Image (spheres, grey):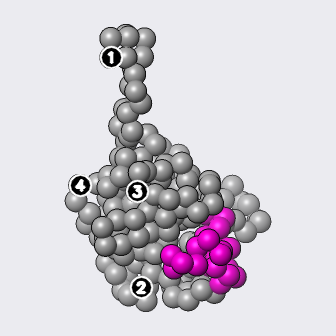
Amino acid sequence: MDLNIWVTYLLAIRDGRTRRTAAQVIVDAARTGNSAIGPVQLVVSHTMLSRLEDVLVRLGFGPGDVSAFASLIGSFARRGPAGAVPYLVLGGGTAPTAESRMPVYNPYDPSIVPPRADDEDGRVLDTAIAGRAHILATYNMRDFQAPDTTDLEPGRMRVYQAAHHRVLIMHAHIAAQLLRTGEIPDTAAPYL
């Protein structure tokens, strides 16, 4: 799960939304370890949990609550079918993300300042690969565009091919539908 799933989940709870969101479906599957498609094992890293804590504190959640929530997420991973402990993924950024790719620009033009590199999403992808995840759910597909990805449904689903593993990157709504109904989209079937 990309961090934006957890953030969306908590914001929905904080705002008292009663309509069930895609984030809630995905988090419930991670929490229980069950879905219509079968067992669900959460793959998460300590780096991701630390980054999530930073984001949630910036959004106004209390530091104690944030720390407890991060610990709870770690326990979801440990209680899942595989009983996986949160991974320690060293390095990060297996693929350049939308933010970390440097655009072509004239280095002699002082009016153009290149954007700061941000490999946070690369670390999420690293964690998915290290944990042998089949699916990475996100609300922000454009952050996972890389040379080693192939669009299956533009803006909704793509596959990332690493040396010995591939990860299906799905928009949260597609992932939630898959977890809720067990119906695999035709374009995803060859990759699951």
Mark 1, other Cα within 10 Å: few <14 / some 14–19 / many ≥20: few
Q: Determine if residue 96 is in view.
A: yes
Residue indicated by mark 2: 79
x and y, in percent, of residue 32 in the image: 54, 84
Disc number lying in front (3 or 4): 3
Q: Which residues are magenta?
A: 172-192
Disc number lying in front (4 or 1): 1
x and y, in percent, of residue 165 in the image: 36, 72
User: Does the magenta-highlighted stretch encompass residue 92?
Assistant: no
Residue 108 drawn above or below residue 182: above
SS at mark 1?
A: loop
SS at mark 2?
A: helix
User: Does the magenta-highlighted stretch encompass residue 186?
Assistant: yes
Quadrant for residue 163, please give it. bottom left
x and y, in percent, of residue 120 in the image: 38, 50
| Residue at left offset 42%, top offset 46% | 97
Whether pointer 2 and pointer 1 mark residues with C-beta atoms closer than 8 Å, the reply is no
| Residue at left offset 34%, top offset 65% | 162
SS at mark 3?
A: loop
Mark 4, other Cα within 10 Å: few <14 / some 14–19 / many ≥20: few
Label of residue 39 in the image: none
| Residue at left offset 40%, top offset 22% | 105
| Residue at left offset 37%, top offset 17% | 106
- Left or right position of 185 against 113: right
Residue indicated by mark 1: 107
Residue indicated by mark 3: 148
Residue indicated by mark 4: 91
Quadrant for residue 53, please give it. bottom left
- Alpha carbon distance from label 2 to label 1: 51 Å
Quadrant for residue 46, please give it. bottom left
Residue 153 drawn above or below residue 176: above
